[in-house]
């Protein structure tokens, strides 16, 4: 519970808070392979998902490591965002997906599908 509260507070500070801000959940489903059909990690593991919302990095979530599916919470006054999804690696991060996404729409952003709901 403390983690959830910390994440919500951090998201409010990162994205700007307002009395009209709403809490959202973003569900991310990543393709099982890169475009070149190789695994995301050298050892064949799933990606370590890192998300940027409107160019602001969201905190790395332990539950988003070595997985193809991740859910994160954030707060915003908007109903559409520019999303970037990366595989967080030690050397350089691999871009998984990027593009605009609106609340309630299933967004196909490349190698990931993103759904944002309140």
Image: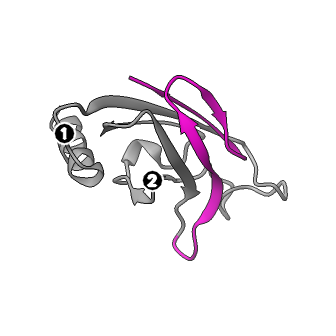
Magenta-span inclusion, residue 82: no
Instruction: Please tell me which of labels 2 and 1 falls first in the chain.
Output: 1
Residue 89 versus residue 32 in the image, above or below:
below
User: Which region of the structure is painted magenta?
Assistant: 90-118
Q: Residue 18: which numbered mark, if any?
A: 1
- 91 up-or-down from 5: above or below: below
Q: Label 1 neighbourhood size at 10 Å, few (<14), some (14-19), many (20+)?
A: few
- Per the rendering, the mark at residue 45 is none
Label 2: few (<14), some (14–19) or many (≥20) C-alpha neighbours in 10 Å: some
In this view, the residue in front, 82 or 32, is 82
The x and y percentages for residue 78 are 38, 37
| Residue that appears at 76% across and 54% down | 34
Discs 2/1, front? 1
Count of numbered tags: 2
- What residue did someone put label 2 on? 54
The stretch drawn in magenta includes residue 93: yes
Q: For marks 2 and 1, give the CA distance.
A: 17 Å
For label 2, the SS is loop
- Quadrant in which the N terminus appears: top left
The C terminus lies in which quarter of the figure?
top left
Which residue is at 63% across, 64% downward?
94
Q: Quadrant of residue 38?
A: bottom right
């Amino acid at each position: 519970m403390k983690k959830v509260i910390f994440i919500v507070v951090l998201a409010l500070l990162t994205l700007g808070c307002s009395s009209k801000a709403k809490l959202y959940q973003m569900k991310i489903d990543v393709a099982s392979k890169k475009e070149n059909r190789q695994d995301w990690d050298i050892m064949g593991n799933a990606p370590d998902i890192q998300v940027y919302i409107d160019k602001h990095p969201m905190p790395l979530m332990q539950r988003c490591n070595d997985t193809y599916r991740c859910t994160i919470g954030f707060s915003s006054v908007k109903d559409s965002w520019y999303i970037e999804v990366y595989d967080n690696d030690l050397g350089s991060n691999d871009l998984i997906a990027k593009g605009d996404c609106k609340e309630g729409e299933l967004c196909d952003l490349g190698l990931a599908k993103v759904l944002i709901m309140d």
